[in-house]
Each structure stands twice: as C-alpha cells, then as structure tokens.
Amino acid sequence: MLDTLTYQNLCTGFTVNIPPIATTYAPPNHPSIVTHHNAFEASINKEFTLKRYLGPYSQSDIKSIIGNFQSSPLSIIPKLGKPGKFRLIQNLSFPHSPLPLVASINSRISSDLFPCSYGTFSIVSLLISKLPPGSQAAIRDVSEAYRTVPLCPSEWQGLVVRVSPDLFAIDTCLCFGFGPSGGIYGALAGAGADLFRAKGIGPVSHWVDDHIFFRIRKEYLTQYNQHCTQVAESIRHNGGLITQGGRQWFEGDTLSDDQCTEFDEDHIFPLCDLSESSPRSDDDFKYTYNFKDIDTISRQLGIPWEASKDIPFSSSVAYLGLTWDLNYWTVTLSNPKHIKYLLAINEWNLSCTHTLHEVQKLHGRLLHATLVIPPGRAYLIHLEAMLAIFGDSPFKPRTPPLGTVEDLLWWSTILNNPPRPLTIPRPGIIYDFIAFSDTSSGFGIGITIDKQWQAWRLCTGWNTDGRDIGWAESIGFELLV
Amino acid sequence: MGALLQKRVSPSAQTGSTPRAANPPVTSGTSALAVGAQIMEFRTALERRKLKSLTPYNPDTWEALLRSSGLIARYPYIPKSLYWIHC
C-alpha cells in the first residue's frame, strides 16, 4: 500500500491505483434495475449523453481494447423523499467474499489513502460559537459532485459497467459505491474551500460536497480576524495538518476539560471586506461578502453548484441533516430527518428479523440523531449489541436482542415529540470542586467536597426489589450533585 | 435519448444475485467489416478521452490560484489530476 504522501507525490491524475485485473469478471446487475427499468434506462442514457460512460460495446470489444476488466453490479434506488428521483449505484464491494482470481475493487483499495477534512458537528459547533452577533450562513451543494471528477484511463479496467445482458460501458468518473470517491472528492472540495478562504471568503466548511458558508457583519471584521490569527498560531504550535486514517484536521488549543479544539482549516487567510466589489442589496452590504462573490470564484474554477439546492444567507440553515440557528445558538434534527428516521423505525418494525446491513442503517441514523438528542445514546445499546452478533453471516436475518423494542419505542416517542433544540455546544470553563462519592454495600454511602464530608448508612433490606450496588452508587452520585 | 442505448441493446437487463459468467458478445447479423469499424470507433473514442478529460473544472485556473495563494504545496496533485493529459 502507498502511504498518503507517496500517493500525492506520485499522483498524475485522479489515480486510485486499482491493482491489475487478472481475469475478466462481469457479474449480472442487481434486480432493482428491472424493478425500476425505466429509471435505469434513463440514468444510463444520461451517462452516455454526457459522455461519462463510453460505449456501449460487447465484452470482447472492450476486452480487446483495454484488456481484462472487472465490472461491478449496478443497482438503482429511489431517492428518499424525492418521488421520481433515483440514484444509480455501482456495487464495487461485489463479490463480498473473494473468489479464485477475483476480489471486489473496493477490497483492493484502502480509502485511508484518500484522506480529506470534514466539517463535522464538533468543528461547525466550535466555529459557530466564535462567530460575532448577526452572522449568517448559506448552503450550497455541488451538482452531481462525484461525476465531475474524471479518473485516469489506467483505472478504467476496474470501472466497467454492464448496461444490458450483452453490452458494457466504461465509467470514466468517480461514482457512488466506490470506496475512495468520498475522499477524492472531499480533498478537491477542501482545496476549493481553501481557495475561497484565500480570496477572503469565509468562514466556510464542507462535508464532501455539502458546503456551509458563513458571513459576518463588516463591523466585526477586525475583531474576528484577530481571533483567527490566534487560532492560526495555536494550530502552527500544535503541528499543523493532522492525518489519521481517512480524516484530516488541524488541532488548536487544549481546553480545560483536556479536549483539543479541532478545525478543518488552518486560519492562515484573513476574511476580507468584498462588499465594494460589486453592487449589492442594502442587506448584503452589511456583510463581508455575498453569493455573487462566491459565484465569481466558482465560475473561474468551474465549480458547478446545484442552484436548486442553494439555501440563501440567513440566521437558520440546515447542514448535516441538522437545523442550526445562529441567533438562538441552537441546533436540532431537521424536519426531513425527523420524518425519515421515524419511517425507518416503522419499516424496521414490519419485520421480526434483520440483516447486518439493516441494523447498520438504523443504528447509523439514530446515532446521527444523538448529536442533538444526547439522552438517545442510552437507547442504542441493544442495536449496538446486535451489530456484534452476525459473525460471518451478515446476510442472515437475526432476531434483535431483548430490549430493542423498548429502545425503538423511546425513539419513536422522541421523534414524534421533538425535545427542545440543543444549545450549540461551545467550549466552557471547567471548575474542579474536588468532589467524590463512594458506596460500600456493607455500610453505606459517603461523599466528599473539598475538605467536607457526609455519610449515610444503608438500611437493612436496601438491596431488595431490584436494588443493588449500582443503584446505591447512583444514589451516592445523586447526593453529591 | 432512450434511443441512444436502444439502438444497440435489448430493453431489459439480466438480473440475479449470484455471480455468473458474462454472456457471450452479440455478433449476429454484423459483418466482420462492421465489427472492425465499431472497434476502431471505440478505440478512437478512448484515445480522444485520454487526450482530454471530461470535467467542468478549469485546471489552469485551479493551478494559477493554488500557486498565487501559496496552496500548491498542500495540493500538488490537483491541477495534474484535472488535466492528466499533459502528464
């Protein structure tokens, strides 16, 4: 395996170094392409029209030109919440278990070789916590992001698709289902975000192609840039860019709770006042930049924003499936996600047994919800226990552990009656009260706060009716706080 | 554009959940000359694509801006990747 640096140094194109294909392998497509035949045909015709697919040609024709190749089954799924819209997926993880001479394309490439930065929940929370009053955010998505990235011809042998029983095409771009796609695109988007910052536009973060642009009022520009200078200095002091697995970030100061602050940029570029660069509305004029300034650079770079997904600057925007309110400093699960997660639970309840993939899907969704519903972490434990029971049979449906039904009932109740929005987490000051509690089943409960103490004896029979040492420890902690 | 694919292929696709050998290539009713022309056309298309990648991004601008902002050292591979034709 090449390490990241070597990859970057050797890279002469969006090369993923798919190992040589030893024998031609062309499995059939997923049945969904028959179920959604019209959508499938429309999708692949679009790919041919846009010349992202080359072909179609017979197996022998393709083999005679590019040599042995490996195709991966195509499937097509309806996009949730978007009736009539479909997503074409190449299952580059097929075959799931290696065959003689054949292993899936994804199993032969490590996604960690394509690291990039992500505007995570904690990074965006920290960013928002430092924004001056009156700041706004806007959202922009790149249109068909993966499909804008060409792959080197040397990779084409591993990216052939079957478009009919007899015909194939070469997919020349990144696609859904390809392990490195997120990292490759994320790195390109990271470079793009840095170029916006270099032009004084920001702060800006992104999760793959989902961008969140913040803007501040001009009167806070100097003050905010001073803050950025301090952050840049602490990042430099802490070693700059950090890469771990497929993720990159910058480390700032250590907080009083021993947590390190994380950033997705190094803050070396100051924000600029671009408000005089072109005519704009009175409202836009209060801020350092507007959409037009983003467009000017985007046009030069050729970044194709999906205009229909643009969310203009305001104090409240949806990003990462969460609604962020910059005026009230709150964050909550977005309405579409509420509905989607409730539907997912209802769908789960239709069956008594589930495959590993189904467990992973539901667990992933609810885990996302715990970002803004922290008590929900306690109601994931049975799903998490279930993740571990599949062994070598991920496709064999299993019965969920006892307690899963109650957990999901809790989630349904919460999602039907959303709790108050969460205050956006921000660094706080930690006070150490030198406070401890302890419990002895043979004696009782004791607490100390600094140099003071208090103790209680446990009465006879305390450890009945389901009470045990865990209960007593909890009481001790309760008495302490 | 449905005709684009329909000219060459049957409207339905083979399905299944287990790997099988690929179907033999379609050759019926096609002369050797026509097949040769088709392969030539295919080869030309591939060569043309090798010379010019398909992307909405402007590699020259990416390179110029990355250089002028001092970011080229962080992203040395991006301009090359966008126009690997020159590599």
Image (cartoon, coloured by chain):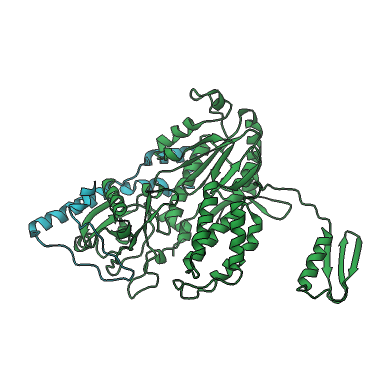
Chain colours: A green, B cyan
The image quadrant that residue A324 belongs to is top right
Residue at image location 80% in from the left, 52% down from the top? A431
**Above or below for A125 versus A200:** below
Residue at image location 51% in from the left, 59% down from the top? A346
User: Can you name the residue that lies furthest to the front here?
Assistant: A350
Q: Is residue B5 left or right of residue A323?
A: left
Seen from the viewer's position, the closer of residues A109 and A169 is A169
The x, y position of residue B64, in whole percent, is 42, 38
The image quadrant that residue A60 belongs to is bottom left
Which quadrant is home to the N terminus of chain A? Answer: bottom left
Q: Is residue B53 left or right of residue A433?
A: left
Residue at image location 50% in from the left, 58% down from the top? A344
The image quadrant that residue A203 belongs to is top right
The x, y position of residue A460, in whole percent, is 87, 76
Q: Is residue A216 left or right of residue A307?
A: right
Seen from the viewer's position, the closer of residues A66 and A72 is A72
The x, y position of residue B80, in whole percent, is 38, 47
Seen from the viewer's position, the closer of residues A21 and A107 is A107
Can residue A266 be seen here? The reply is: no
**Above or below for A34 versus B82:** below
Can residue A269 be seen here? The reply is: yes
Which quadrant is home to the C terminus of chain A? Answer: bottom right
Q: Is residue B65 left or right of residue A403?
A: left
Count of picture labels: 0
